[in-house]
Amino acid sequence: MASIPFQPSRSDLSATSDVLDSQNGKPPLPPQTRVTFARRTSSGRYVSYSRDDLDSELGSSDFLNYTVHIPPTPDNQPSDPISQRVEEQYVSNSLFTGGFNSITRAHLMDKVIDSDVNHPQMAGVKGSSCAVNGCDGKVMCDEKGDDILPCECDFKICRDCYIDVLKTGEGTCPGCKDQYKTTDLDEAMENWRSLPQLPGPGGMSNKMERRLSLIKSTKSLLMRSQTGDFDHNRWLFETKGTYGYGNAIWPTESGFDNEKDGDMYESAELMNKPWRPLTRKLKIPAAIISPYRLLVVVRMVVLGLFLTWRIRHPNTDAVWLWGMSIVCEIWFAFSWVLDQLPKLCPINRATDLSVLKEKFDIPSPGNPTGKSDLPGVDVFVSTADPEKEPPLVTANTILSILAADYPVEKLACYVSDDGGALLTFEAMAEAASFANMWVPFCRKHKIEPRNPESYFNLKKDPYKNKILSDFVKDRRRVKREYDEFKVRINSLPDSIRRRSDAYHAREELQAMKEQRMKKDDEPIEAVKINKATWMADGTHWPGTWNNPTAEHTKGDHAGIIQVMLKPPSDEPLFGVGEEYRLIDLTNVDIRLPMLVYVSREKRPGYDHNKKAGAMNALVRASAIMSNGPFILNLDCDHYIYNSQAMREGMCFMMDRGGDRICYVQFPQRFEGIDPSDRYANRNTVFFDGNMRALDGLQGPVYVGTGCLFRRTALYGFDPPRAKEHSASFFSWCCGGRKKNAAVAHTPEENRSLRMGDSDDEEMHLSLAPKMFGNSNVLIDSIPVAEYQGRPLADHPSVKNGRPPGALTIPRELLDASTVAEAISVISCWYEDKTEWGQRVGWIYGSVTEDVNVVTGYRMHNRGWKSVYCVTKRDAFRGTAPINLTDRLHQVLRWATGSVEIFFSRNNALLASSRMKALQRIAYLNVGIYPFTSVFLIVYCFLPALSLFSGQFIVQTLNVTFLIYLLIITITLCALAVLEVKWSGIELEEWWRNEQFWLIGGTSAHLAAVFQGLLKIVAGVEISFTLTSKSGGEDEDDEFADLYVVKWTSLMIPPIVIIMVNLIAIAVGLSRTIYSVIPQWSRLLGGVFFSFWVLAHLYPFAKGLMGRRGRTPTIVYVWSGLIAIIISLLWVAINPPAGTNQIGGSFQFP
């Protein structure tokens, strides 16, 4: 693999082309991004400043709002941990904005929210004021919030004033007038390292420091900045992580032993150590799975014989009825086979968290410090509209993530606000502030679940199994704080509106005052000023305004990044006693994971690709800021219900062979569902049946949320050892393996970053900018993420592993250039002429969330495997629409996405040979199932047509037909019982799923087919509508939304089917009773199938009735009119012949 060399300076941002594309006429890409000195005025304007200008402005009230970051040069680059931490605090207190053809600005915010902030990691945290006259700066503080003071007299001085004092040459403390112990600037910065407030760099010995210094002086390619800062992550990758603090395995002088086999050097202890797996497969008992498979074969044979018999015995009296039924039955059999074949190999899996802890969190020869050796995880939370996705719901999701049981320093949370709303921004800031109490409380008392709304609404006893004596007192105080937190969140819309009105009124008064000064005697005209949305620090919000105007709308605003919680220290930070806080946090780690607010840039004329585009923007931004090798994506209403869910998923990724797993999919579990689950909202048949079955093949499909991704798989790379898999028929069906001699001697890290079908031994990353864009920092992060995501090489059987202790080093501190680079990669122009959305990241091409299925399909098509992780305690929980109309529209979006997949290049019929046959069938069924609705709606009218005409689908109800029908029904019921056994679902849930299959098939699926065809044929785009996450209007009833009837055209087909079948039963029964020779067999056949249809549509009919019969009049009007029209139409087509039939001698006029 020919890897791209690292740039000498990470702080240098990616250069972009300034040449106008003559072919497409697009404007040139913006020049190299830079961070400038600027002051933001009260009106929101930026005024450029030089250092001299800043010196004259020290007494100004606007001084707090100037930008303090400049492009790094050798004379201003921070060279010690204290300076870097000081700059990191500046970064976390700054709101970064920028985008296409604009300068990236860092707006230093005096405060982020109106309420006080007291956690030292929180953006907007206020330290002590600088005591130097004329300076209103803030003293830098450490992780505990204590001031960092260089003099023993404790005179409070900010960093800039301290540096100015040393630069003047005097070096005297402005307070006590004594000389500072160190007057040399470089030496002073070095001495700050020994201050007690901040821990050292992990307690390295002098010998190790000298070794690192030696490497720093010789490895020029490993330098990250112009001052020669050592890039430890890059060094780990290039040296395979075998040298450094925390590693007990050292390479020989000649390299690694067994290098021809691609194995790392192993000590004798590891060679003889028994392998302890992190996961294991739990096979389905043979007493259940064997009869299940046998019944599937029997039913397939019976269906074949039945269809053959039906074709050979037509109904000559009603050929049209027989023909329609035959076509429908053939399609139903085909659809059933597609659905049933992937279920032949279901499996269950189990994890061993104790082994994971022993390998990664307990001191060992490879990790003597005992620091966590787990890889980093970046959690993505997406939201788009605070009106449909309430900020309180999103805030609770964020709190559950921040309190997750995962190493704090390895966890980062990114919130994507695709609407760019200040309401979401301040709600996230409030959540970060409340996390200061909630997260330590959860850690102290081992709270589950760690979503405060769900926890405080638990029906069970909250005091059960609580050992600490102060739990009751702590819970009561936290509950009181949470109630106040909810009040602040819910009052944010009014607070923002009142604040904006006040500032707008001040702007108007100021404008009128200026106008009077210019025009003394002339009449004053009304001043029109755009009504802006104002932040808490008294400046304009750079995102979407409540009163949209140019460059401040949902589709036109700058990119925004705000580090709400800066990265924590790598050492535990324990709290203090009750006298300083509401609850006693002694010996409780109070650190919080990094939290970042991101709103990507949007401009008119660009296709932003909705949710998938927002997720890809987070992928790029997170790669630059934290670069976690694994990504967990969650919807804003899906929170972490099991605090150890990420550890459960990591068991699969870190197990032997885990480097070939692209993602770990967790089942979706829902809250707020009515006890009867009227509309099959829990979807347990799919999540506990189909997904377990797919886990026995190549892996479950990606369902859009609750999924732990491998970052390199999202980047479009092939799995390691991909060329070892032959394309023979056996491997195509069963996944057999065969060594490829052409790549047997390729270094393993090269094979880990292979892309495409090329047999070259080197991965040419020279084409990387064409795939990933022109950010060198992003490209350089790819091999680092791949290396850090490898399993632990603690046994010879582990291939493509990393040595123990390689990930115990602290993460890099944030600087301004890093965040500015992240701003550039979320710009609207960044994806132009790249593979983002085509091969890299979330795949584009659908208006619905079902584009997620395509993302997983592409990975399986490249040979990756996925895993289904079902935990004893639900990993995640979310909300689902229980209202009939919302549920139908949700299913409509899903089905529309499936239709688009079928007519795209992502059709499973075009899959590569790396995808197994049964996996291919499963993906084919994903694209085909909506088309069943066409045949289903015809089949639902067949019983009514049979009763109206007095005919049936067969000539007579003979014994052969009844035997076939009986066998098919019995095998279906037996399969359902066995499927319930191995999947763990209940029989009632299976029946609810069957009922909604017909309800959705006759309404939403049918509309999806027509919408999909309309888009393919006519190019008519389909609008995308968010599913509302809020509940009903009646807050006293938890299920009030269930009874709300909202009219939609999707209800028309099921209503017509119900009415027509009811009328047909009455017509058929009356005709048979009044007939001279009653045809009871035909009546029974028609009535039986009509009741089959009505039984499936019963939940739909019940939903139309609402609560206490509050059904819209339009439902009855349309139903009655359509039923009458169909009845009269049938009488006109086939009027009664004699007086013995119903209706007497009535003739249609």
Image (cartoon, rainbow, N blue to C red):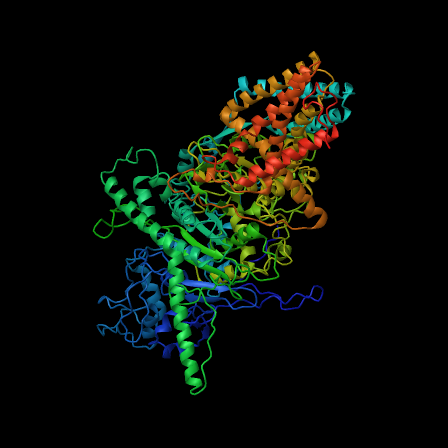
Q: Residue at x 25, y 47 (%)?
A: 583
The part of the image, by quadrant, that contains residue 134 is bottom left
Counting labels gives: 0
- Position of 636 with respect to 192 (left or right) is right
Towards the viewer: 1039 or 337: 1039
Query: In the picture shown, does residue 795 fall above or below 601?
Result: above
Towards the viewer: 501 or 225: 501
Q: Residue at x 64, y 19 (%)?
A: 968
- Residue 268 in the image, given as x and y percentages of width and height: 46, 35
- Residue 566 in the image, given as x and y percentages of width and height: 39, 56
The part of the image, by quadrant, that contains residue 813 is bottom left
**Which quadrant holds the C terminus?**
top right
- Residue 207 in the image, given as x and y percentages of width and height: 38, 54
Q: Is residue 727 visible?
A: yes
Q: Is residue 283 visible?
A: no
Q: In this view, which residue lies farthest toward the top? A: 959
Query: In the picture shown, does residue 596 fall above or below 367?
Result: below
Query: In the picture shown, does residue 519 fall above or below 1071?
Result: below
- Position of 473 with respect to 596 (left or right) is left
- Residue 1068 in the image, given as x and y percentages of width and height: 66, 22
Towards the viewer: 223 or 664: 664
Q: Residue at x 58, y 38 (%)?
A: 1117
